[in-house]
Image (cartoon, rainbow, N blue to C red):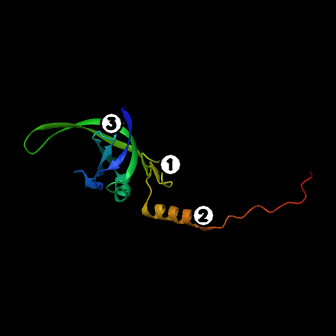
Amino acid sequence: MKQAIFAGRLGQDAELRYTPDGTPVCGFSLAVEGRKRTEEPTWVSCNIWRERAEKIQPHLKKGGFVTVTGEVHVRTWKDREGQLHAGMVVDVQELTFGGSPQRQEPTGQERASGDYLTDQQIAADRRRQQAQKSQPQTEAPFDDDIPF
């Protein structure tokens, strides 16, 4: 199995499609930057399959930064003029939201592995984080019985 990890920004909102047998597929493209900022990005096509596709698609928006891990395939196709093309496609097994090349830590704990986060789970996590931030920090009570 050829596994790879790519990190980049989505070039457009993810698209949810269905195969002829009804299997959901969420497709999106990542712009992966090279070592030099002056280089053109490498575009990587990604697919997420089945139930995970339907769950994650609403969260994949243009410009969002994600890291994907998956199996790499070479896909060939003919365009409308009959020209043969080939390109790399990643079947995503793991996807992590947030972070950016400029920042070391990801934003929040919006990690999706196996079962992807739903809208309700993301909203609940954000509410929990906001509640923790708004609670006053209390110091531990002072203990006068320290023997020294």
15 horizontally vs 111: left or right = left
Q: Return the residue nearer the eye: 112 or 64.
A: 64
Judged by depth in the image, the label closer to the viewer, 2 or 3, is 2
Q: Position of residue 28 (x, y in %)?
A: 29, 50
Residue 38 got which mark?
none
In the displayed structure, 141 sits above or below 8; it is: below
Residue 132 got which mark?
2
Residue 16 quadrant:
bottom left
Mark 3 element type = strand
Mark 1 element type = loop
What residue is at 55 percent from the left and 62 percent from the top?
129
The local crowd at label 3, few if under 14, some if 14 to 19, many if 20 or more residues have their Cα within 10 Å, is some
Amino acid carrying label 2: it is Gln
Q: Which residue is mark 1?
A: 105
Q: Which residue is mark 3?
A: 72
Q: Return the residue nearer the eye: 131 or 46.
A: 131
